[in-house]
Each structure stands twice: as structure tokens, then as C-alpha cells.
Image: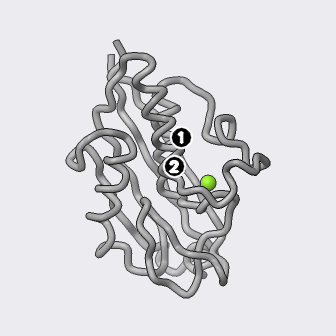
Amino acid sequence: MVHVGIGYDVHQLVVGRKLVLGGVEIPHPKGLDGHSDADALMHAICDAVLGALGEEDIGHFFPNTDPRWKGVPSKIFLEEAAKQVDRRNAKIVNIDATLIAQAPKIYPYIAGMKKCIAAALGISGQQVGIKATTNELMGFIGREEGIAAMAVASVDLP
Ligand code: MG
């Protein structure tokens, strides 16, 4: 039976951090703040996959109080989510995600993000959808104080 999971994440944009989204480093005057590399897109996808399995969330598997996860690339979180899928002999059907960022322009990086996400999850790039939108200058995202990501995952469970 196909199960669906949802994920959401947001991180603050600050000066002095690299901006990493979907495993791709994007040149920008500010980056996302967080314990790991703060890749909000990968975190949202990770929660979507874990959610489809009925598992606990990313914070349970990788607490932000644990020094092991400090500054790590978020692909390791996706690799763990994929391991959880394997453990149940399940298969990811597809992932779909939306990034909400006022700046920078995301479109040029989407192909690279799909590659990184697909590689971390052990699926094909054609199973990964990524879209991006601005927040029409409204709210904290519109003021470029943060970037958010939403994701869904469908997983075929035996
Ligand atoms: Mg996060």
C-alpha cells in the first residue's frame, strides 16, 4: 500500500554561513543557520519520508544537541531515512517539494538538487520533484530572514 508523508522545515538566513539547499552550495551573501548544514529542503524531505513510514521525525534521529551532527551535510539524514525505508522492504515512489525563498533565484540549481537528493535516497532523479516560489515580499521569508521548504513523499510499503 502506498503511504504518504509530509515534511516542513524553516531556517534563519544569517551572514557568515554557507547557503546549502538540496545538497547544492549556492553563492549568496547569507546562509541558513542551524546545527547541521541547515539544508531546509533536505530536512523537509527527510521528515516526509520518515512520516510516510510512521516513524519519528528528523529531530528524534538526529538531535540538534548531539555534537556528532554539528556542521554535517544533510545528505546523511536522507541516507538514514532511505535505510529506514529499506529496513521495511519498502520503496520510495516519489518525492515532491517546494522551496519558499525570496532570494536567491533557485531555478538554476534545481537540476543539481534533484541529483543530490536522488543519490542520497538511492532513487532516480525522475522520482524527485522540486519547485521554488518567492513569498511575494511578505512576512519573514519576503524580508529574506529565512527560507522554508515543504515536501511530500509517497512510499510503497509491503
Ligand atoms: Mg532543519
Residue 76 percent across, percent down from the top left: 51, 46
Instruction: Kindly identify the residue that appears in the image at 29 percent across and 75 percent down.
Output: 108
The amino acid on which the numbered mark 1 sits, given as a three-letter code, is: Asp
- Dot 1 corresponds to which residue? 47
Rendered view: 158 above or below 35: above
Q: Which mark is residue 26?
A: none
Instruction: Kindly identify the residue that appears in the image at 67 percent across and 68 percent down.
Output: 33
The amino acid on which the numbered mark 2 sits, given as a three-letter code, is: Ala
Q: Which mark is residue 44?
A: 2
> Which one is nearer the viewer's eye here, 137 or 147?
147
Rendered view: 54 above or below 98: above
Question: Quick check: 148 left or right of 27?
Answer: right
Instruction: Kindly identify the residue that appears in the image at 70 percent across and 48 percent down.
Output: 68
- CA gap between label 1 and label 2 equals 5 Å
Q: Is mark 2 within 8 Å of ligand 1?
A: yes
Question: Quick check: 90 left or right of 124?
Answer: right
For disc 2, the neighbor class at 10 Å (few under 14, some 14 to 19, many from 20) is: many
Mark 1 lies on a secondary structure that is helix
**Residue located farthest toward the front when viewing the structure as drawn:** 68
Q: In what quadrant of the picture does the N terminus appear?
A: top left
Residue 144 percent across, percent down from the top left: 58, 80
